[in-house]
Structures are given as structure tokens and as C-alpha cells.
Image: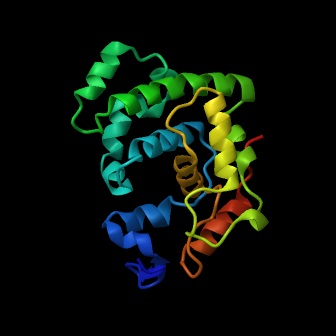
Amino acid sequence: MPDLVPGPDGRPRCGWCTAAPDFFAYHDAEWGFPVGDDIRLFEKLCLESFQSGLSWRTILAKRENFRAAFDGFDFRKVASYGEDDVARLLADAGIVRHRGKITAVINNAARCCELVDQEGSLAGYVWRFEPAPEDLGEPQTASTSPASVALSKDLKKRGWRFVGPTTVFAFMQAMGLINDHARGCALRDQAAQARAAFTPPG
């Protein structure tokens, strides 16, 4: 896949945008822009875990279904799910019906509640793992990083599941902890400006 492709407005975009029609909108409005909202961060960790072994195209197409099925990824609500909810989710054709991933989301919601009680917020916690600019490699050449390994290891120590270094790296790319837009991409500078204007939660 080429590093850059022309977008709908003719300006260059990251090459992966051509994989699906809705990728351009996702790339331009979301991917790589900093997020400080706990619910959105939890949602993305969950969706990345569902993506494991699948394509992001599959997950993005089902995102609204996932949101409806998991109470908008309100982790305090999801943490209270029981076996009836697992059965409901396994019967929901609008999401990925994988028992291990479904039960991992419920487990991770409970672990997220614990983390927020201990650390103050999920956002404040994950942004502590933002790598320094000098520690970043060339954009779109890696699937893990020392920062994603460290965050993955700490989450696992806290009891989270389906949060391997590759999953966490994709999460960090998407949520703006790493600006991985290709050099020359029209959104790279915009993402950098958004990060400069963003104050990570304490």
C-alpha cells in the first residue's frame, strides 16, 4: 500500500484510507487526534480488542451496533453485566459474537472502575504513557512501541484482558498519544496542532 493517496479533496492522506470508503472520514475526523474522555478511551480499548484477528473495517462498520449493545461503553454499567447479558450479546448478530472478547470487555469494565477509583480517571492514567517525540520512529513502520509495551504490561498487571502491545499501540495511534499520520499526509500537521492545544488530564 502506498504511503499516501489523494483524498476526496485532492490532498494527500495516509495510504490505508483506500481500504474502505468510510476510512477517509474516520481518518480525517478521529484517527490520531487527542482524546481525554474516559468513555471514548474505554470504548476504543474494547473495539481494538474485538478487532484482534479481524480488520478495523469490520469493527468500524459495526461500531454503532457495539455502542448500542454495550450501553455506550459506560464502563460502570458494563461492569455490572451478568450471564444474561453475555447470552444477549452472544445472540446479537450486529456485533462480533466472540465469548472470550465479550467477557473480556465486562472484566475490563470492572478493572476500569477500579483504575478510575485509584487513579482519578482513565484518561489521566493512559496519557502518562504518551511517548516523548524523540522516542517515536518513522510513522507507520511499527506495530508496537516501548510505550505500548509498557501500557500493555501495566494493564495486564491490573487484570485487564485482550490488551496486548499491538492492540494497545493501535489504541495509542487512534487516540492521539502517537501521531502516526504519514509524513506528507494533510492531517499530520492538524493532529500535531490538536495535540499542542490539548492538555492531558492530570
Q: Residue at x 35, y 50 (%)?
A: 54
The relative height of residue 76 versus residue 62 in the rendered view (above or below) is: above
- Position of residue 157 relative to residue 127, above or below, is above
Q: From the viewer's perspective, is residue 38 above or below residue 80?
A: below
Position of the N terminus by quadrant: bottom left
- The part of the image, by quadrant, that contains residue 115 is top right
Q: Residue furthest bottom?
A: 10
Q: Quadrant of residue 19?
A: bottom left
In this rendered view, identify the residue nearer to me: 66 or 151.
151
Position of residue 174 measured from the top left corner of the image (x, y, whole percent)? 54, 56
Position of the C terminus by quadrant: top right
Q: Residue at x 47, y 22 (%)?
A: 77
Q: Nearer the viewer, residue 76 or 57?
A: 57
Residue 114 drawn at (x, y percent): 64, 22
Q: Position of residue 104 (x, y in %)?
A: 45, 29
| Location of residue 79 in the rendering, given as x and y in whole percent from the top left corner | 49, 20
Name which residue lies at 40% across and 41% down.
50
From the viewer's perspective, is 198 left or right of 164?
Answer: right
Would residue 123 be found to the left or right of residue 84 on screen?
A: right
In this rendering, the count of numbered labels is 0
Residue 66, quarter of picture = top left
Q: Nearer the viewer, residue 37 or 6?
A: 6
